Image (tube, grey):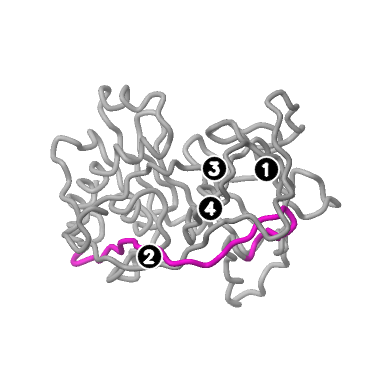
Amino acid sequence: MRMRGMVVVNAAVWFVVAVFGATTQRVWAQTSAAATQVSESRPGAPAPAAVKAMAFEVVSIKPNNSGNQGGAWGVSQNTYRARNTELSRIILQAYLGMFPSQDRLKGAPSWVMTEPYDITAKVDDATADSWKGLRQAQQVAIAAPMLRAMLEDRCKLVAHTVPTEIDSFALVIGKHGMKMKEAQPDETAPPRFARFEGGWMIVYPSMKGPDANQTMTYLQVTMAELTAFISLGGKPILDQTGLTGKYDFEVPLLIDPNPPEAEEGAAPAPRPDAAHMYDWGAIGLELKPIKIPALNLVIDHIERPSEN
């Protein structure tokens, strides 16, 4: 991922975290709808066994005791890296795909959900070559069996999947029609922006100056890219707009991106989901609640990672 202009996100070449003050809304890089959903064809079956031929060459797993907020994880060049990241997130990515929500993991001890780790897992040269030119979602799909092998070896992880229904949203055109303009292929990029896979861009509120309206600006984005982006780490959002072009639009935020910090010892404010973060009606769209079939992952056994 290439970042231009003022960096307002905790960025690495592998993923992005956008921080809205104390509410810390994680917004991750655009993923592909083709990201592998492991074992979707066999609901209720044991979680997939790791393919022994697919394994990392070198793995380091260390507790992160920094006390810092936020983490990042994903593939960069010949390495899968996680920084300050709970094992629950790595487990879910390994077994269910890119970024399922945390409530899809069942039976996990509390430390799996709360204790952060740093992970560096390198692949051999042949695997690294096969990753070149692939999108992050495709790289993670290839890395998934290696992640499962790592977790089964270092954490003695045993898990299985169970079918379920999860709350979701469908993005549709509102009753008054959509209010976005089609993007022009030769339009000039703004002075400060973040560019994502596929070439689409975001201008975050803090890129616009302290007195600017609290809005998010999307440029050159398809509805498929938009829904994939705002789904990550939260409830899935399906594109049912029927729109196939690329669009530019500015959507008002319904939350304060820079709220006052919570008093010491007070519980942090809940993280808003996409349904409550944007004023969708302002751009002629609407989110309708739906339910979709999915899998949960149930942990049967897990131990803290063995030492390096």
Mark 1: secondary structure:
strand
Is residue 299 covered in magenta? yes
Kindly check if marks 4 and 1 are in contact, taking CB atoms under 8 A apart as contact.
no
* Above or below: residue 166 compared with residue 307: below
Residue 240: which numbered mark, if any?
4
* Above or below: residue 159 compared with residue 270: above
The Cα atoms of the two marked residues, 3 and 2, are separated by 29 Å
Would residue 3 appear left or right of 104 to someone viewing this image? right
Could you tell me residue 62's position as x and y percent?
Answer: 33, 50
Could you tell me residue 158's position as x and y percent?
Answer: 17, 60
Q: Which numbered disc, 2 or 4, marks the residue that appears first in the sequence?
A: 2
Magenta-highlighted residues: 276-301
Amino acid type for the residue under numbered disc 2 = Met
Q: Which numbered disc, 4 or 1, marks the residue that appears first in the sequence?
A: 1
Disc 3 designates what residue? Answer: 225
In the image, what residue occupies the spot 35% across and 28% down?
131
Kindly check if marks 3 and 4 are in contact, taking CB atoms under 8 A apart as contact.
no
Residue 113: which numbered mark, if any?
2
Kindly check if marks 2 and 4 are in contact, taking CB atoms under 8 A apart as contact.
no
Kindly check if marks 1 and 2 are in contact, taking CB atoms under 8 A apart as contact.
no
Question: Few, some or many C-alpha atoms within 10 Å of disc 4 (few <14, some 14-19, many ≥20)?
Answer: some
The Cα atoms of the two marked residues, 4 and 1, are separated by 19 Å
Residue 92 visible in the picture: yes
Foreground tag (2 vs 4): 4
Residue 264 sits in quarter: bottom right
Q: Which numbered disc, 3 or 2, marks the residue that appears first in the sequence?
A: 2
Question: Few, some or many C-alpha atoms within 10 Å of disc 2 (few <14, some 14-19, many ≥20)?
Answer: some
